[in-house]
Amino acid sequence: MKRAWRWLILYPWLMVGVGCAPGSTPPAGSRCADNGPPRADIVFKNGNVYTNREGSPRAEAVAIKDGRIVQVGSTIEVAPYERVAARVVDLKGRTVLPGLVDAHVHLSGIGAREATLNLEGVASLEAFLAAVKAEVAKKKSGEWVKGRGWIETFWKPPIFPTRADLDKVAPDNPVILTRVDGHASIANSAALRVAAIDKTTPNPFGGEISKDASGEVNGMLIDHAQKLVAKHIPAETPADLERYLLLGVQRELSLGWTEVQIAGNSWDEVEMLRRLYKEGKIKLRIYDAVSGPSEGASRLLQQGPSVGEFGGRFTVRAIKIHYDGALGSRGAALLEPYADAHETSGFLTQKDEVLAPLFADALRRGIQIETHAIGDRANRSILDLYEKALSTVPAAERKIAEPRFRVEHAQIVDTGDAARFAKLGVIPSMQPSHAISDLHFAGRRLGESRLDRAYSWRRFLSAGSIIAGGSDAPVERGEPLIEFYAAVTRKDLKGFQGEGWHAEQAMTRPEALKAFTLWPAYAAFEEKERGLIEVGKVADLTVLSADIMQIPVEEIPKAKCMATIIGGEVVYQANDF
């Protein structure tokens, strides 16, 4: 009799269906579904599992069947599934998280960064020019040179390059090189001549052609002014776009991202993604927002959202709006002038009379709106527009009860406006790495008195908001462990924070974990499917080499992705996994 009771204690599924939640719909493959023996395709055991579940946040093993989780618990509790599984993976103590989600990314841009002149990390103007000179040497005379990723923050002095600088190394090739934030580019004289830009050219709406003290064009093009040159660059081919997308997908999987949320692309890119899914070339989950106002955005409004294509891998249900520029290039729209350039307070890049009917239409058709807003003036104005749309379109006319409109970045927000996000149900979609990149120049741009309203994660959380965490790659490196580190430390990768950077605004580690798992799922209307490791949820997991919830914070960025699992399929694994 003692042996029998010991058996029942070790294997409780003999008495009751493990993982069966009272009143819940049992997942396919679980004993709850048919009162038969446990079934599983793959079992992960002997792990350090963080479930995100209240009350039972830790586990050791996970069993998966037909792409969903059928059991979570100790290795002993999951043992019955191990005996019938097609594959068993011994995690050997490695850490398992709910599948990581990047809530703000530019997928084709990541691939383009990998495939073209990547200026990320150039530490001086001299190194910048040397990289350009080397690239020019590969080109024929007159052939365009494009690149991205430079930032002047650590140059001495930290000032923008000029067209005269570029002319020294590229006199015969048109050159345009985009700053890391994507909101400014430097062009040489050859590129400006192609675009017929000179000191008499007027600034376009939502942009600026920078000039030197004598009134001559200095080559810096801010926000919409970049388009004056960009339209003359030979168009990228569909083959180029496909290569960029696939490069981006592979990089994301290798970093542990199980889903990315694209913050604005074209309808052509949407259709290409669909083709690549049909051809079996993409495993990554993608939540897509089409850039607007545009023909593609109008098409989405007409057709309505498309949710869960290709077995739940691809959703198109949002429109992305650019409403102001970036802080680094002084395009972010501020309530007061820049501390280091009193002649400007930035500018808005869209007209409210165009956006207001679009937002109302989106509410009626079930389309989510996500708006890029960095400066405090842009954030206040977009909240005003959202509030007007929500009051204009009654709940009975809305396609969905909770529209979950988003503000992308929400970097500089007046303290009085932060509480409005939660009140209006607007989600701040924020990228922690911006805070540790910008800390080196934000004080100059804003002055110390305004730093208390910058990257204020704690203020949002205390007001009742959730934060959908992202990376904004390729603006930032796009690595989840850097984002997690930034969220919990507010320090750069060398451990520097500096005066007045408000350490109290950091997240806790459990909050940071939710910011890259459960909260992005909510921001994409997917919280019933993912974000937790529990029975019935989609089996998206990220396996790491170290326990980022416990190790010293300075070791977090050194951890590695060991495996990425999407729908129960191991879509990436390190060589030593």
Image (spheres, grey):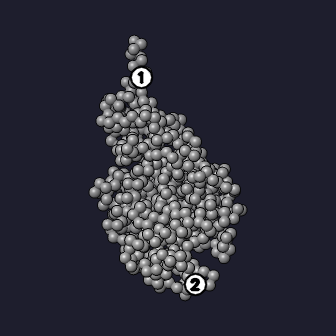
Query: Which residue lies most toward the left here?
Result: 279
Does residue 249 appear to the left or right of 129 in the view shown? left
Label 2: few (<14), some (14–19) or many (≥20) C-alpha neighbours in 10 Å = few
Please determine whether, in this image, residue 100 is positioned above or below residue 219: above
Q: Which mark is residue 161?
A: none
Q: How many numbered discs? A: 2
Question: Residue 195, image x and y in percent?
Answer: 46, 82
Tag 1: amino acid: Leu
Question: Residue 278, image x and y in percent?
Answer: 29, 57
Relative depth, front residue between 380 and 546: 546
Q: Could you tell me if residue 122 is visible in this image? A: yes
C-alpha separation, residue under disc 2 versus residue under disc 1 = 80 Å
Please determine whether, in this image, residue 499 is positioned above or below residue 225: above
Does residue 441 appear to the left or right of 407 in the view shown? right
Q: Which mark is residue 10?
A: 1
Q: Residue at x 59, y 48 (%)?
A: 488
Q: Residue at x 67, y 70 (%)?
A: 340
Question: Residue 461, image x and y in percent?
Answer: 61, 50
Tag 2: amino acid: Glu
Question: Residue 510, image x and y in percent?
Answer: 56, 43
Mark closer to the chain start, 2 or 1: 1
Give the residue at mark 2.
Answer: 216
